[in-house]
Amino acid sequence: MAFEGLSERLQAVMKKLRGKGKVTEADVKTAMREVRLALLEADVNFRVVKTFINRVKERAIGQEVLASLTPGQQVIKVVREELTQLMGGQQSELIQSTRPPTVVMRVGLQGSGKTTTTGKLARFLKKQKHHRPLLIAADIYRPAAIKQLQVIGGQLEIPVFAKDEQSVPVQIVTDGLAQAKENDHDFVLIDTAGRLHIDESMMEELKQIREAVHPDEILLVVDAMTGQDAVNVAEAFNRELTLTGVVLTKLDGDTRGGAALSVKEVTNCPIKFVGMGEKMDALEPFHPDRMAQRILGMGDIISLIEKAEQAVDKKKMKELEKKMQTMSFTFDDFLEQMQQVRSMGPLEEMLAMLPGAGKIKGMKNLTIDEKQLNRIEAIIKSMTPDEKSHPEIINASRRKRIAKGSGVTVQEVNRLLKQFAEMKKMMKKLTTMTKGGKKKRLKFPFSPF
């Protein structure tokens, strides 16, 4: 996960400050020295580090901290606020044209993930914002680039405008835009060509496309794993094209995160989206405040709730809540809820959004065994409808049949049945709790595993 090393280092520094009843100027200087080293090791641009440390130091040695009742907490608040400012201050949303379609031009080097990101953004616009995007395949140089975009478009049920590889990119884009207007598409996403490195011919072609269609957004797609190089690439593209924003891909990888902390300060271009995985739904709007909280180990409950709201069917959740309260919860319901929770993304990623998760014993380096979850699904799917509704009828011979049908051992079937029975008992206690002599119903969603 991005920022892991930086996050651990900064949390250790903050822990020392938090415990102090009184913070001296010497304490602040010592802490800032450690923060500076942590940021440099995370591949944050040295100029950015210098500016950040000066800002924090100036505020932390001022009256707002030293005169406060909890100076340690106040320093942490200053660090969080300055970290948020460093990454842009507040979320920067996509610019939308007052006269649709809104035109979004994607630029970047080859291998940065432009084509895949174009598809991810189209999915985001269609599913979460209810727009009608059109994709334009303007990369005629990379082998199979057009085909790749067409495959992605087919999977997402989003139309792709393309011509043969002998066509001129500027003409492809202008013809595609005309089709978008004819068919009432409110967003046009242009997938442009990249190179292995920045060269004049690529920039000239991009400038021609920009002049032909006057895009509302010019978004640079850059690989976060390239670290400081990502910032240099952003500077070069911004100088030539005047970018409106940046999309950082592979932020979920084993990266030090320096690009995310440097790119806004160096280029003055906001980070608008981050890629957090390979799947088509793994693109998130970038929230500087939430990222700062994650880095400092404060969790990200808002993003977790948003993911849950997108993944969970509210009508089904109400039905499930009733079943839990009346104790009519079945293995079919269990399976459905498990699938909904899994659709939110990797479970360890969800757990990492909980405040203080890194401090919980056993949470560090925790990995959820997806294979084990698949085995649970297989066991449930091997049951008959009666067995799913009334697990108490599952005797020894039925257990053997279920084990054989799901390719697991009888012991695993026994374990799941026992866990399910215990979980129902726990639900009975949770759904009706006594508070001050009155019964109080607990609200769901509630994950049963």
Image: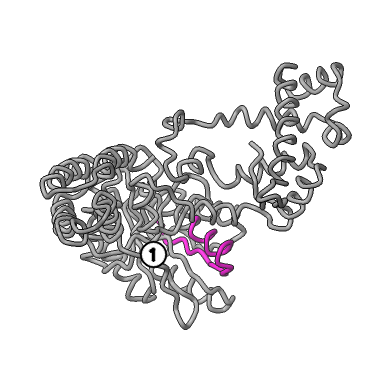
Q: Quadrant of residue 69?
A: bottom left
- For the question of whether residue 285 can be seen, the reply is yes
Q: Which residues are magenta?
A: 120-140
* Left-right relation of 75 to 338: left
* Left-right relation of 379 to 304: right
Q: Position of residue 182 (x, y in %)?
A: 57, 78
Q: Tally the marks.
A: 1
At 41% across and 43% down in the image, what residue appears? Answer: 252
At 71% across and 52% down in the image, what residue appears? Answer: 438
- For the question of whether residue 444 can be seen, the reply is no
Q: Nearer the viewer, residue 186 or 154?
A: 186
Q: Quadrant of residue 106?
A: bottom left
At 74% across and 20% down in the image, what residue appears? Answer: 414
Quarter occupied by the C terminus: top right
Q: Nearer the viewer, residue 168 or 32?
A: 32
* Left-right relation of 131 to 247: right
Q: Label 1 belongs to which residue? A: 91
Q: Amino acid at mark 1?
A: Gln
Q: Nearer the viewer, residue 247 or 379?
A: 379
